[in-house]
Image (cartoon, rainbow, N blue to C red):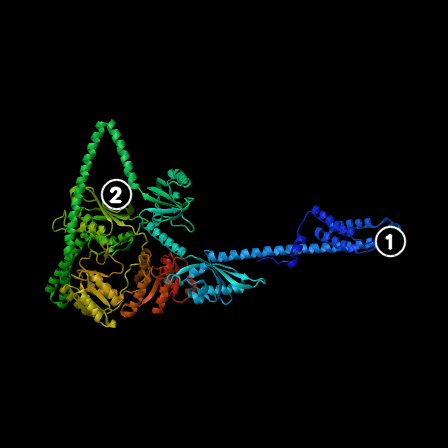
Amino acid sequence: MDAPDWGPVAPFMRFLAQPRSLAWRLAFAIAVIGAAFALRSVSAFALRDYTPFVLQIPAVLLVALVGGLRVGLFGLVLALAANATFVPREVWAGPDAAGAAISLASFALNGLVCCLIAALLRASIGRLEAARVSLGDAARAQESTLATLESLLSNAPLGFAFFDRAGRFVQINDALARMAGIPREEHLGRTVAELMPDFDDRSAPLIERVFRTGEVIQEVELDGVTPAMPGVRRHWLVSFYPVKDAAGDTRFVGTTVVEITEIKKTERRLAESERRYRLLAEALPKMVWTADPAGRGDYYNHRWQEYTGVAERCGGVAEWYTFLHPDEDAELQRAWAASIASGEPFNRECRFRAADGSYHWFLCRAVPVRDEDGRIDRWYGSCTDIGEIVAAREALARSHEELERLVTRRTAELADANERLRLEMKERLAAEAQLRQAQKMEAVGQLTGGIAHDFNNLLTVIVGNLEAAERRIGADNAQARTFLDNCRQGAMRAATLTQRLLAFSRRQPLDPKPTDVNRLVVGMSQMLRSALGERVTLETVLSGGLWPTEIDRNQLENGILNLAVNARDAMPDGGKLTIETANAYLDDAYAEAHDAAAGQYVAICVSDTGTGMSEAVMARVFEPFFSTKGPRDGTGLGLSQVYGFVKQSGGHVKIYSEVGEGTTVKLYLPRLERPVDETEHAERPAVAGIRTARVLVVEDDPQARSLAVAVLREAGHDVTEAETATAALELLGARDPAQRPEVLFTDIRLGAGIDGPALAERARTLAPQIRVLFTTGYARNAVLRQGRLERGVNLLTKPYTQTELVRKVTSILEQTTDRKGAALLVEDEPYVAMVAQQILEDHGFEVTVASHGAAALSHARAALDMPERGAFRLAVVDLGLPDMRGDEVVRALRALVPDLAIMIATGYGTDDLQAEFGGVEGVALVGKPYDGATLRAALRGLGFNISD
């Protein structure tokens, strides 16, 4: 675009507006005035003729136009002087002098007016020419700016678009058209809803908001599917701004679009990588930590917290070097500071303080990880326990010192070496003997455990039939009743013998409960005094502040009573029996030497002043059937029973004795960390009357099954029997749900196929409220965990009496259940799922775990299709799942089960979920990580009766 032109007079106007020097303008004035008077000279006019002034006035006007006011006045003065020179002298002396003066004055006045007019005209022409030039420059600048903007819109890597008030595209650049996958010209006149519906829900309100308020909205994240990449969810970072006209009104809304899909993918990959690193760090057996470039620790795995006993503080963690040994603190911190300054890896051995105040040796390593520019981004460190290595190294150093001393003290050291060799050989022989003894005892244990099941089945039948015979024989037949009573006593002695064999072989089922040993010993005092007789004095020395232990109380009482009876037999002439209790700690050295576990124990010491034992007797004292008494005075199973029971309970037994000095037996029972509530396992008062119920008896031994069925029917119960687990499940499935058995009485070992515990699990799926009573004569791992009854398991050991069977069935019928129903746990992180499942099961839920959203929905539909399983009452859903979002799973579950209580767990905060689920009845929001208290509070908020 060019500036406006002057038309035909443009050259003259530019000539007038062109700046010139003063000398040039003066010369121009002289030339023009001189030319005017040259024309006058040529003219033949007289002075009285005024025609010559017609040429001189335009000349003065031209000089003023070209040279300006001052030069014009100079030209006027020059012309006036020249005109005065042309007047003859005689005119000035004659009567015409006045006329000549008037003529010259008139010329001067007219010339002055012309100079002023010319000066004003020259200034106006100058301003007009400057304005014309400025307008031309502005037009060219505008053209350049428009060209730059067009190039920017066309070639910028960002997407640009402009919208009118109807939300239609009025301009869009090629970059945004490529991102959308729609040609540029097809956008014009159309809306976002028509072209990209996924983005309309968020963008349309923002465009309307900018038109309404005129504000700038920066960096709003929008996501959706575009025609350019169907099936792929893309993420855009969009800014909106107003485009205003001269009046200040918003004419258009402009927008810039940046593609951040890859950034979001990278963020997800980074988050996944971080999650995997945390899992790996938590799974490693060593202590792992990280620090920022300045060396400040910002993460320590749980092994560090377990070792130091210091949990992560709110807002930070305790630095690793705060646990250093005082002798190494300063040196290690200097070395760490040097590594931070130089960027060199850190590698030092040091001692760290443990939670119990002890120090252990660790190899502490840290390596820097650098960014693309070579700067340290983070330090990754680990601390590896090298206590054994340091101990071996110190031992090696001591060995070197020993060798040096051997060089200087040959004879003495050689003799000492020979003595050590002899002792070592003695210890090796003792170890070999101990190994043979252990193998022998294990073989006996396997033998006794193997026959116990069948033997106890036989005893069950014998005892049951003897009781039935006693009830059917009249009171007048005293001799028959005596025979039956003797048989029954013999059977019970055989049962006791079997139990002792199982105790020795560590196969007996234990029912441990939290126990105050001091109170147990006090409670046994009267019974012990009766068993010891008058010649033996009983003294108890009970420790204050004694730790509790978790133990089978009946077995512990039997063990103490066995030790007391043995002590009484070792003091035929009387003596003193002392029972002491104390807290004890077995260190690693003692534990390794005596085949025990290091740690804290409750010790019970039973000491007598009897005849004592020789080393030969002590070597065999725990063997079954070994006894120093005559064959009529004992079975030789007392101490072996105590030994097996304590070992099965996770404890340790040690015996000390000298001939003529007495014997001390120490029982070490594992400490229980929590205090004992003596009312926790108190016996409930008997309930008047016996409640009858539907009972299913499953037993593969025909005689034992027939006996149990007869006894329970005689007690008034409605009894159904089955020989195998398969037959029992068929009976359960064929029955109407309202008529299914209330009690399942099953043997643990049912021959080939499904065993008792597996039968119980399947039975609970068909009848969730069914109560289960197990029976066995030999239970190694079926319903036991390390020889102990699982929590909530009811067990009746064989052989049992009819009264015991009826009483046990009655007791489990009186038990109250706190079943909360079925719960669906949707969590892909195995460690979190394991913890949450345990918490829910502890509070009475039957938990089904799903790691994917599709699997969770499948479980929910299956529960609806199978009413006998029971519908889910609770769902705990993680927000981040591998196949779909957790909120989608929640919506689907609420559609399937409208009254389902749902707990949504997320590690990204609950603010985004508040809009949809906040305040919704039956939905609770829980942030991760969560603990048992958090879950319990959420469950209470959902209406469940949950106790702490």
Seen in the image, is 758 located left or right of residue 546? left
Q: Nearer the viewer, mark 1 or mark 2?
A: 1
Q: Secondary structure at mark 2?
A: helix
Q: Which residue is mark 2?
A: 590
Q: Secondary structure at mark 1?
A: helix
**Quarter of the view holding residue 186:** bottom left
The amino acid pointed to by label 2 is Tyr
Residue situated in front as seen by the camera: 348 or 794: 348
Whole-number angstrom distance, CA of label 1 to CA of label 2: 152 Å
Q: Is residue 265 above or below residue 943?
A: above
Is residue 220 among what the camera can see? no
Residue situated in front as seen by the camera: 530 or 802: 802
Q: Is residue 374 above or below residue 186?
A: above
Seen in the image, is 760 located left or right of residue 926? left
Quadrant of the frame with the N terminus: bottom right
The x, y position of residue 499, in whole percent, is 18, 55
The x, y position of residue 592, in whole percent, is 24, 43
Residue situated in front as seen by the camera: 59 or 436: 59
The amino acid pointed to by label 1 is Ala
